[in-house]
Amino acid sequence: MSQNLLITNCRLFDAAEAEQTTSILIENGIIRQIGQIEPSDHNNKLDAEGKIIAPGFIDVHIQGAGGCDVLDATAEALTTISRTCARYGTTGFLATTVFKPDQPNHHLSLAARHKDINPSGASILGIHLEGPFISMEKKGMIQPDSICSPSMKVLEQIHQVTDGTLKMMTIAPELTESLQIIKALVSSGVIASFGHSSATYEQTLEGFDAGISHVTHLFNAMPSLHHRAPGPLVAIFSNPSVSVQMITDGVHLHPAVMKLAYEILGADRIIPITDGIQAMGLPDGRYNYNGVEYESKEGAGRYADGTLIGTSLSLNLILKRFVQFTGCPFETAIKVVTENPAKLLGIEDRKGSIAIGKDADLVLVDREFTVYATIIEGNIVYEK
């Protein structure tokens, strides 16, 4: 149960006057007042000491952290991921993983049950499945046992095991029956996201017409642009209603490409993600994902053949690099990992901004994105 909390001497990340401090009163996990507030003996207090307060970060694509993965299929693993995320300012995330046809998929049923449990870490806001209806040629880190042809029967199995918590599915629209699956996803309130696809320009447009509204890790696991075969990228860039994930570590995308994408798409369409793996928050070394060893080095995870499989960077560091490589203003950078994902997930009425009546998911940072405290539903879950 959330207790009342009064945060004093904080600076709103988007305040007109940068040095202006304010206070925020939280009651029962909800922001109740913002302004100059008289302290009460009934409130717990947190002195921000002039640090910046921002909405909690939201990561819509993360597989693991702190040495654990969603695939571990244990409550302890999910708790470790949640606590690790909170250390770096993330207050909510989509548990991103795979579906294995003809297997029990206990990791999904567990994540579905664990969704609303966040005693000391970031909240699981739902499940994001990469596949199973994706291109074998563009599978990247995803193993063949987690890929199958599009099937309404398999989709029904997915819905059963995720029990209403499926929020996003990455799908390749060029596959036979994919368009039917996309329409079914959208009609059930699930975000259909383009990704791990070999689609042509025309097939990508067909996917958009069927209901795809989002793109999984732009540029990665999809065809490159060619002047006689534009592929999906031209279709994506040309559709203003489609938002995109970007792994802004400077490795998955060259900084120059990242900057170009930012200039063309604009900040409103971009959502930086970690594509985080177990090694997030841990030293460089060798780890294991879905039965295959990989190496984490300087923030990037790779299989032995060099295939990139994700990052071991926390979202605050991903955001720092996004600013470094694009020149994005600090205030805008905060919005791309708070307001943008909240709108994508349809929870902007509760999360993604600081306003009276919103959930008290907050983070204290400096302009280098160092995290000093993380507050989730009014509870201080991390303090530096």
Image (cartoon, helix red, strand yellow):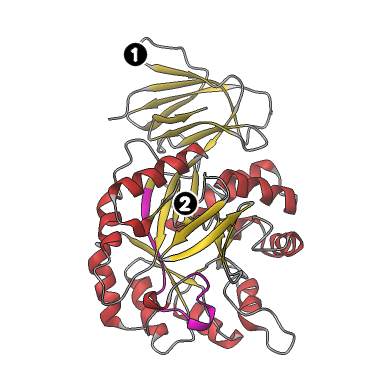
Quarter assignment of residue 134? bottom left
Depicted 90 relative to depicted 296: above or below: above
**Residue 45 highlighted magenta (yes or no):** no
Q: Is residue 164 visible?
A: no
**Label 1 is placed on what type of residue?**
His
Residue nearer the viewer, 379 or 315: 315
Q: Is residue 370 visible?
A: yes
Which stretch is magenta? 124-141
Q: What distance separates the C-alpha of mark 1 from that of mark 2?
A: 32 Å
Q: Position of residue 78 (x, y in %)?
A: 35, 49
Residue occupying image coordinates x 48% and y 79%: 172
**Residue 130 highlighted magenta (yes or no):** yes
Quarter assignment of residue 297? bottom right
Could you classify mark 2 by the number of other residues whose Cα lies within 10 Å: few (under 14), some (14-19), or many (20 or more)? many
Q: Position of residue 30 (x, y in %)?
A: 37, 33
Label 1 close to label 2 by CB (< 8 Å): no
Write down the residue under mark 1: 42
Residue nearer the viewer, 110 or 238: 110
Which label's residue is closer to the chain start, 1 or 2?
A: 1
Relative placement, left or right, of 11 versus 42 is right
**Label 2 is placed on what type of residue?**
Ala
Residue occupying image coordinates x 51% and y 39%: 89
Residue nearer the viewer, 74 or 34: 74
Write down the residue under mark 2: 342
Q: Secondary structure under badge 2? A: helix
Depicted 368 relative to depicted 4: above or below: below
